Image: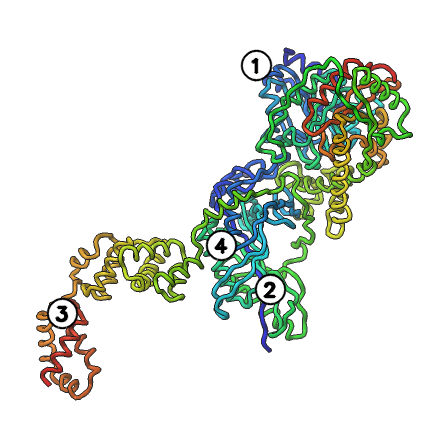
Amino acid sequence: MNWETVIGLETHVQLRTKSKMFCGCSTAFGAPPNTQVCPVCLGLPGALPAANGAAIGLAVRGALALGCTVHPKSIFARKNYFYPDLPKGYQISQFDQPLATSGTLSFVSPERSVVTATIVRLHLEEDAGKSIHDRFAKGTGIDLNRSGVPLIEIVGGPDLRSPAEARAYLQTLKQLLEYIGISDCDMEKGSLRVDANVSVRRAGETAFNTRTEVKNINSFAYVEKALTVERDRQIALIESGGTVTQQTMLYDAKENAVRPQRSKEESHDYRYFPEPDLPPLVLTAEFVAEQQSALPELPAAKRDRFVAAYALSREHATVVTSNRAVADYYESVVRAGAEPQAAANWVMTEALADANDHQEQLRVAPGALAQVIALVKGGTLSHQAAKKVFGEVAAKGGEPRNIAEALGLIQVADTNVVAGWVTDVLGAHAPEVGRYRNGETKLMAFFVGQVMRASKGKADPKLAQRVLEEKLAASA
Amino acid sequence: MSDAKAVADRLVKAKRLNALLTPPKDLRKSLNAQAAAARPTGVLYGMPVAVKDNICTLEFTTTCGSRILEGYRSPYEATAVAKLKAAGALIAGKTNCDEFAMGSSTEHSAYGRVLHPLDKARVPGGSSGGSAALVAAGAVPAALGSETGGSVRQPASFCGVVGIKPTYGRVSRYGLVAFGSSLDQIGVFGRSVHDAARVLSVISGRDPRDSTCEDRDSLRLPTVPESLQGFVIGLPREYFPPELDPAVRRACDRAIRLMKELGAAVREVSLPHTPYAVPTYYVIAPAEASSNLARYDGVRYGPRFNGAVDLRGLYRSTRGQGFGPEVRRRILVGTYVLSAGYYDAYYKRAQQMRALIAQDFRNAFDRGVDLLFTPTVPSPAFKAGEKLGDPIAMYMSDIFTVTANLAGLPAMSLPIGRIKGLPIGGQLIGQAFLEDEMIEAAYALERVVPETDEA
Ligand SMILES: [Zn+2]
């Protein structure tokens, strides 16, 4: 039986603001517990919220980048539930009149090429605090530093058809939000959190079946795993004659398993109502336009431009634009005179590998990389030698040419010198010369290797081959 | 200026009323310190102002008349309190009130009922009964109260003092412990219109900490007018029903005649949705209260009670034992009306009705009426215990006052006579942010009305 998975993601993203959503407390990560708090985010009697304009601006940017309709008027609402790390007993969120609705996110699916998923809505809300269950032997600690931190919730439509596709969607969303600078999107620090609605149906069916909500997916690495586990559970359940019930499933990364949330932990009725402490959020056209103009070129547009302007393949352009810093770096290398495809090859391999090992730092200046590329192109450096020079510049800095000279890596492109090495090699390998002349032309690689060895790697291999071909042909 | 000791002595003398929750020792100590620190240039320099116990102060505990906040000391003070202090006023202790301002008699305090200064068998009204009683007893010239549905004007009427509830958004609510956030306003009691008005002027004005507080300068006090020439006073017929206590009607008639003699034009108007005001109020206020009071869970502050074995147990014991019966009743009602499946039938309809009630007032004002005059309460102060067993009867004593809260309008009560020795209040309702006109009319009426004469 063929099964199709239907997935929709609800993503919570922490906005990159200095202060919280409704008070002036710092949002910095990692401070000692309960040191970034005030009467407002502690929910003390009599305290009132005042909305953070910077957070609203970032949320609007996010909505615009996702092609959403940003509503000139939206309403804050209270979501009521009891939990010890929710100091007011309600979370200020938005409900029936959210900040923005109906956007899209296009991404490359591993199965269906480019997919355009719908963004149902995007709204502003505040975060709750954190319950710490493992710090005290007899009791739970509560840290309210995170209480009131600004979030946007991005609700995607049920448009994803596999766990891998969900991962690709999330990756693209993360990339977009990082690009426009509104969030760090660091799942490990909790600045990006994702819940998934999952259902399965037989191939060809068009109606949606009962879905479950998968929560507690705490790391990017678990997204695909958690969804696969839940999908497989549902399929097995239905195939054995059971039915899926609508419930919340908690993912356990250690066991790579899901378990239903105890019904006690579930909040059934949030009793939403308009937040009387905050007037409607009214956005002027000027404010929205300002946020629009603050947006950089988005990844998809940049990728298309790279394909058109630099004649890169779509795949290469996708890699090079996957991160805003890398894309900017690539363009600088090209601007410094490097040939675009060669620049892409170097950025995708050496530069990214080096960055990967060094806290995402692109350590070789764009001009230096352009010079390395030029040295290879001019025949001064072999590709292998150029990699060595790149590594040296990355580690110690300096001019690529000087470093190549200092390391003795400059290729010898003097025909007379190379011809001397060729003569020596042919003289020392008479049997192979004979076999070559009898048609075993694949021995050319052997001869080139011998010349490189004789020259201690300094011979220009292309020149060596040309001289070899001439000599082997001439005295036939 | 009255010195700190004299201020404290007067308050301690009124101790029998149970109107003040601050222990005399704490009061004396704080008043000494405050008097030494007060700014001599402030417009209220040396004026003692008692503060209702649901308004946060640094000097004293803030318990809201509830067991659940017993001993709670706020680490910050309300904007209104900070403004009073900046003006040189002395915070003269915290006054007893109905628990979380829910009540109309100040019998619903966890710290005992407040006695009416003129008849200890009667209630002072509520929920700001402690503030009203202290002003009426002459212990302080002014006090802060709070209103959600008449909690300043009704006790002002019962106790024979002036009580003003400003326009919603005129005074910052920051530091006023929330009950019904869309209705709550800090209000003022005074021995005279002037005492109440000058305190209101000081506490009014913009506050970035309260997003519902209007971005306006503080209220400018009007001068005492020579006459009411040019004023058009509307008399809403729904506020003078046939069953109105005849003595209340007589007192109102006398006040109306006096205003006419001062040159005011008087005209009957209709506010047709008035009969729905109390039911509307008793949906919206409890709904907001059910959410506002969710934070009292015993986790972060306030006492914990026995019986907490797990999280649910903690919630249950804290909220079950910490809240009194009236608060629990309103939380239940509020939770119910916000629940899925009931929201549209109750909360949403109540909001629609609220809009109609506000429209009634706009219609009256659009037809050239400047102010409305009505009785504040249908009857004088009732006896303690008389309405405790009948919440609906208790709620009906707010029938003429809740409308101004629902419409967000400024309103005030001032004494206009007595029935068998008990004060009767007359109510003026003004247009939004036109407190100055309302106060001007009150100045004029106050000068001529025989406020302690039998009606
Ligand atoms: Zn804070």
- Residue located 19% across and 65% down the image: A379
* Element type at mark 2: strand
* Element type at mark 4: helix
Q: Quadrant of residue A162?
A: bottom right
* Element type at mark 3: loop
**Relative depth, front residue between A132 and A112:** A112
Q: Crowding near pointer 2: few (<14 within 10 Å), some, many (20+)?
A: many
| Amino acid type at mark 4 | Met
- Disc number lying in front (4 or 2): 2
Q: Which of marks 4 and 3 is nearer the N terminus?
A: 4
Where is mark 2, residue-wise?
A: A198
Of all residues shown, which one is farthest toward the bottom? Answer: A438
On-image quarter of the N terminus of chain B:
top right
Residue A472: percent from left, percent from top: 13, 81
CA gap between label 4 and label 2 equals 20 Å
Residue B44 visible in image: yes
Q: In which quarter of the image is ligand 1?
A: top right
Counting labels gives 4
Q: Mark 3 lies on which chain?
A: A
Q: Is residue A145 left or right of residue A83?
A: left
**Relative depth, front residue between B74 and B372:** B372
Q: Crowding near pointer 1: few (<14 within 10 Å), some, many (20+)?
A: few
| Amino acid type at mark 3 | Ser
Residue A415: percent from left, percent from top: 11, 70
Where is mark 4, residue-wise?
A: A187
Where is mark 3, residue-wise?
A: A455
Where is mark 1, residue-wise?
A: B41
Q: In this view, does B361 lie to the left or right of A248?
A: right
A116 vs B430: above or below: below
Q: Mark 2 lies on which chain?
A: A
CA gap between label 1 and label 2 equals 68 Å
